[in-house]
Amino acid sequence: MSRVAPDDVLMTGVLPMLIRSNGARLRLQAVLCGLGFLTTLVLAPAAMAHSGHDHGAPPPAAVTTSNARVAVQSDAYELVGILRGERLGLYLDRFGTNEPVADARITVTVDGQDVEAEKASDGTYAVTSADFAGEGPLELVFAVSAPAGDDLLIGTLLLPVRPAAAAALPADTTAALALRVAPGLRVGGVEIAQPYTVAGVVGLGFLLGLAARSRSRLVPVTSLALIAVLATTAYAFSHEGEDHGAGDAKATLPAGDTPRRLPDGTVFVPKPSQRLLDVRTSLATPEEAQKAIILVGRVIADPNRSGLVQSINGGRMVAPEGGLPRLGQTVRKGDVLALVEQAVGQADRTTLSERVGEIEQEIAVAETKLKRVRQLAERNVAPPSQVVDAEIELEGLRRRREIVRQTRIEPEVLRAPIDGTVAAVRVVAGQVVGSEDIVFQIVDPKGLWVEALVYGDVNPAKVTGASAMANDGTPLTLTFQGFSKALQQQATVVQFAVESPPDNLSVGQPVTVAARSGISVTGIVLPRDAVVRGANGEAVVWRHTDPERFEARPVRTEPFDAHRLVIRGGLAEGERIVIRGSELINQIR
């Protein structure tokens, strides 16, 4: 069974019957007027609602707003003020280095009145004024007085506009008010996005009334056709541009006081965050420097300030009274480090025993002789000189016997050859060592060298200076000592002395040596920490463009020394480059 629309019933059944009947004109007029009124009531809300494709209460947009701020800079200083209520916090830094200035005196002129800034313990300043509660731009003059120099800075603080309270519209808002509202406004909870939709609905009601008042039969039919066309057009316009997908809520860029990467690739870092990250900058200045060559080296001990402890004959290790020395122990020259009990063979033991027996026999004969000579000397038969000779002979025999006994039992004493620190201990108590075994190594921690290999493409005679970088990133300043005339592993050995070596530097530790070859180059020299790797792997530096904005700049580098690089391209003279904290800025997303 097919469904019949109410409009079809009206056109095929009701209207012809009303037209053919007598006195139907009045009833037709009443029906058409009622139809116009109902059409206006039905189509107006639908058109209004679909015009802005608003099918319910819109989701609230989560937008974070940052505090009002003022940023000014000069050749000497850089100042940023952040407003929180009626209190303006001031951050004063040096322009070239971004170093905080905590010993300054700042006087702020607000609307013609001078206000002295208060110092805080964290190196910031603060100004309180009732004018900060206003709206719109507010010009401020900062008079800075510091030991590094005085300066005058002028900036504008854009105060936020306070939102006005919206008056509630009455429930019986008239159609005339609806026609005067602008597109995008909401009237009675309904958003009006297309004014011509409202005009079309009102026009429908006017045509219906005109059709009711006409005496011609063609006018009502034509009016009804126009009603259908205008209703369809209004409905189509109300759906124009409608999108019910994810585009209902537009994404907004967060604008808070937290570090973030902006859509253009730059990074916004507020001044409080710069203080926490300890960001420092430097002005790019070209300079002439010597080109560096990279060498592979290792740490060795200074030959004049180190020593090895070895046994001459070998034997069994015996600990002294204080025990064997430990690693890192400080010793003085001549300190007993260990005892070596020499090993004596069975044949040697027999020979020594026989020798001791012979000496003891000679001692017994000498004692008898001395006794007899003394008796003769007492009776003046023998001269006293014979007594003295006998005593000397007896004393010599006793000393010889003692020497032989000590040879059998006295161990070898191992002593420290220099003042220094025990760098290696290769024995324990009871261990048997040979005559060539290294028992201990003594090193002066303040006397360390670096030994590197130079291959044929570099003339070692032109090396004027060098620096090194340990595996943990510790920079080392080196002084050239000399090079060998004999090749080792097809390379020339070059030695450098380490100036003020750090405590964590050890003998045998591998290092990377950057030696200056004497060839001059011109470029911007920056610390290695200033150059980081970008997302695509290229070398970049961060340029300080504004007080709270940083921009990544790709560069081409060459090694200069262990802790500096030469920028050969990508930077211009006078640009502020981050030399500390660039790795942290590079991680901000």
Image (spheres, helix red, strand yellow):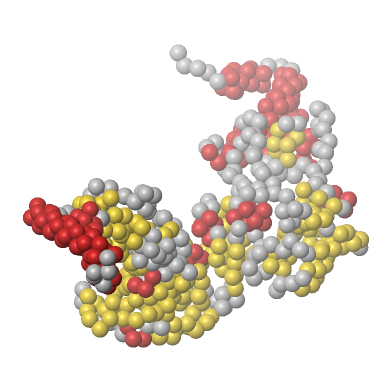
Image-quadrant location for residue 35: top right
Image-quadrant location for residue 223: top right
> Residue 161, percent across and down?
80, 49
Q: Quadrant of the N terminus?
A: top left
The residue furthest left is 347
**Left or right relative to 472: residue 150:** right
Q: What residue lies at 59% left-to-right and 43% top-to-bottom?
A: 250
> Residue 372, percent across and down?
21, 62
Instruction: Report the front residue among 478 and 373.
Output: 373
Q: How many marks?
A: 0
Q: What residue lies at 46% left-to-right and 63% top-to-bottom?
A: 502
> Residue 481, percent across and down?
37, 80
**Left or right relative to 117: residue 578:** left
Image-quadrant location for residue 146: bottom right
The residue furthest right is 113
Instruction: Report the front residue among 20 and 139.
Output: 139
Instruction: Report the front residue among 175 and 54.
Output: 54
**Left or right relative to 210: residue 438:** left
Q: What residue lies at 73% left-to-right and 50% top-to-bottom?
A: 67
Q: Is residue 238 shown above or below 560?
A: above
Q: Do we see residue 127 in this rendering?
A: yes
